[in-house]
Image: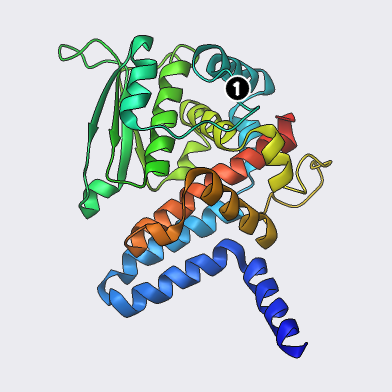
Amino acid sequence: MASSTRQNDADANRSSTGFEGLVREFSNVARVTRRDKTAGLAALKSEIAGIIREDYRRALRQCLSRWEVREIVDEGKTRVWPGLNQEPVRLVSPHEFVRRWSSFGVDFKFASLPWKEGLSLLGFYVKKIDQVRMRPLIFVNTAHHPAVVGVALDHEMGHHLTSQIFAASARVHLLSQTGFEEHLTEPAELAADILVSLGIFPAPIARKLFSGANRIAAHSEADELSGLEFSKLLEYVANRYGFGFDHMRGVNTKLQTLAGLVHYAKLRRALLDEYGR
């Protein structure tokens, strides 16, 4: 009985630490194996801490109105994902993605960039390049876990779908493993992220994962994810998309991917709290 109690206490502690526990775990491995990379790791940990502290409800409200979010969702449902926000998007290979959506007036390019600097890039979208190409282009780095590649594909397709809403210029929209906080002040980036988060966490699943979401949130604390919610989140993405940090190599890659996961989860919860989506 005492042994069972200690195990329960350990499980509770593990649950309560949530993503902070994962950050510490990855950092401890890094200190043993790559002592010369502490500066880079410190920057990654600082970014994750910033995402955790950020009030996503306020950021969403300041960046996109309820009407704009509705327009973004309608565009995604009408043109590409008819079950958006009702059922999870399916994880398909890049070539299957192209087969399904190449008729949407966009070209696709893929390459594997497995070195450190290459891994920092997930993909990009460009509407046109003057005197070089006149058709939109989506590029995705296939060196990442298939689930991460899927996120990049959906994000860049989100840019293509919403390019008319935001009058996209010829500039390149880069999606990297860092800088998610910057998306919260850029409507075009946040729009693409919204489509990703609704695809991964449709409303029926989001309401189960985020047990405290959609309460009267106006006077509550910032939208923090509890340890229990984060544990349920990890279990869900593992079961649904075969995603887990054990499948990833490199502490930097794990921390960067953790930042992305927390970003999309907090954005999804903010959509429930602010706009009931």
What residue do we see at 19% from left, 13% from top?
133
How many numbered markers are drawn? Answer: 1
Query: Which one is in front, 36 or 116?
Result: 116
Mark 1 crowdedness (10 Å alpha carbons): few <14, some 14-19, many ≥20: some
Q: Which quadrant holds the C terminus?
A: top right
Pinpoint residue 198: horizontal percent, then vertical percent.
59, 32
Residue at the bottom extreme of this rendering: 2
Query: Which one is in front, 93 or 138?
Result: 93
Q: In the rendered image, which residue does mark 1 sit on?
A: 83
Tell me: residue 117, above or below residue 29.
above
Residue at the left extreme of this rendering: 131
Provide the secondary structure element on which disc 1 rests.
loop
Pinpoint residue 39: horizontal percent, then vertical percent.
33, 67
Pinpoint residue 193: horizontal percent, then vertical percent.
51, 33
Q: Which quadrant holds the N terminus?
A: bottom right
Query: Which scheme is used to colour this image of the protein?
Result: rainbow
Q: Quadrant of residue 65?
A: top right
What residue do we see at 69% from left, 33% from top?
203
What residue do we see at 21% from left, 44% from top?
113
Is residue 173 visible to us here? Answer: no
Tell me: residue 261, above or below residue 62.
below
Query: Which one is in front, 38 or 74?
Result: 74
Is 228 left, or right, of 242 in this rendering? right
What residue do we see at 49% from left, 44% from top?
241
Say which amino acid is labelled 1: Gly
Tell me: residue 19, above or below residue 111.
below
Q: In which quarter of the image is residue 4?
A: bottom right
Is 200 left, or right, of 93 in this rendering? right
Is residue 106 visible to us here? Answer: yes
